[in-house]
Image (spheres, rainbow, N blue to C red):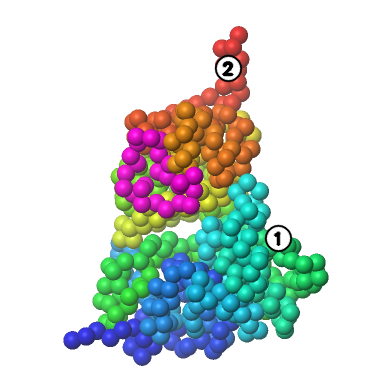
Amino acid sequence: MSVPTLSRRNVPAAAQIQRRAPEGTGIVHLGLGNFHRAHQAVYTALAMEREPGPWGILGVASRSSTVADAMNAQDLLYSVVEISPEGSRVSVPGSHTGTLVAEQDPESVVRAIADPATKIVTITVTEHGYTVSPETGSLDLDSDAVRRDLGEVWTPRTTIGQIARGLALRASTHAAPVTVLSCDNLLSNGRQTERLVREFVGTFAPTLRDDLLSWMDSSVTFPNSMVDRIVPSGSDRYNETALAHLGVRDTIAVPAEPFTMWVMEERFAAGRPAWEHGGALFTDDVEPYELMKVRLLNGTHSLIAYLGALDGRATIPESVAQPFVEAAARRILCDEYLPTVTVPESVDTDDYIRQLFSRWSNTALGHRTSQVGSDGSVKLAQRIPIPALEHLRRGTVPQYLSLTVAAYLCCIAPPPGFDPGPHARSMTDPARPRLAGMADNAASTTEFVRSVFVDGGLFPSTLASHTEFVSRIADFVDIIVRHGPAAAAGEASDPVPDLGTITSLQSSATI
């Protein structure tokens, strides 16, 4: 007997969040990946369940049509499988009204952003999708993709190009207000997105540029936001779980942890869904939540992933179960990241930390180290430099931030002759070829690390002037290669002299 495919006709009422189809399309979302489908789409479905409205989502995939094709075959539906050791819960959001694939039809993306029915453009394209120069923090005008988009009015491929061209068409036709809402792990993500779009527009001919920027001043808002939910890659096991719960076939079920959080500035130029009914929080100051998440959660998550992968661990729960990984995670979180953030008054720090370790230990979810460790060249640029500089200016070398960089380099660009293991090799990173070349050509580990800071395009080159930081990273790379990640973590836990003492000892040795 054949099993029916998921559709609006056969979803069990208990599993469906949004039972009514949206009353129109009001949101264009760039980045039709798992995170969006398990986060913003769920909040939007819950909002429309309480307050119906024209807030359906047009989901835009960047390149692959796999998810879009599957959603179209399933009445734009899919299931979200919430996984915990206590069991699974399956829901069907039902908040999408259409899909596009930008690579195949970039002009339709521009027109969708410009459509007067569109009130909000949301974004989840990862840090890498913003085409930012790591050295300047500005739009990477040397990027081939950006240069191409600057010459193409109707076929932009980059996220910033799509938004800028869509806004230009919008301003020149009906000029209705709109909100652009980044939901990626960028600090001050709304401000950054606005600045990058304005930099793109700044290359236009003077009349078009000035008119468009003037309209943006009055009619386009870019709120900051913070998003949080662990969403692993999908697999057949989650499709099977959805089938067991729903009794229908879903080929694109999305796994997610039960925890979810969304914090936004209340700055919407043309209205918004009642996302508070899904649990979203609105505030005048998102930055404390952003820093808390990007550093305490994401920064620590990166260290867990790199140490775990180097130790042969396939998943984050397996990694954090290793005593040396858990100890290193607690030390970087409490000793090195926490002093650089101001935790919001509404958050109990001890409870938040306990909750983080509980989430990382969710064995049922099985978030893979290779997924968390991928794209570190972009992620670590948001997580390492500012906290590291704060500690260095206070006169201390941040041991675990150094260890994070060292473990990342061993995973992505291992020194010649060192095998980091299958989980590290499975990590994807646009900087891998460039860094691997540096590792192969360096005369010493210290020279390699220094070249990463000077020429690697990952971190601000100012960090290269802190020789004690560069040297400590090189030390950890050597220890990982010779003795393994546990030995390196043990070395990081040993007390070390502060920079003043180091300078004094170096002066005495010179004398």
Residue at position x 35%, y 36% from top?
Answer: 418
> CA gap, disc 1 to disc 2?
46 Å
Residue that numbered label 1 is attached to = 199
Q: Nearer the viewer, residue 448 or 341?
A: 448
Report x, y in % for residue 439.
Answer: 45, 36
Identity of the residue furthest to the left in this view = 1
Magenta stretch, residue numbers:
411-434
Can residue 383 be seen in the rendering of this structure? no
Report x, y in % for residue 112.
Answer: 59, 80
Q: Which mark is residue 164?
A: none
Identity of the residue furthest to the top in this view = 511
Mark 1 or mark 2: whose residue is earlier in sequence: 1
Q: Nearer the viewer, residue 338 or 221?
A: 221
Report x, y in % for residue 167.
Answer: 68, 74
The picture quadrant where one finds residue 486 is top left
The secondary element bearing badge 1 is classed as helix
Query: Crowding near pointer 1: few (<14 within 10 Å), some, many (20+)?
Result: some
Q: Is residue 331 magenta?
A: no
Residue at position x 33%, y 49% from top?
Answer: 423
Q: Amino acid at mark 2?
A: Gln
Q: Which mark is residue 506?
A: 2
The picture quadrant where one finds residue 213 is bottom right
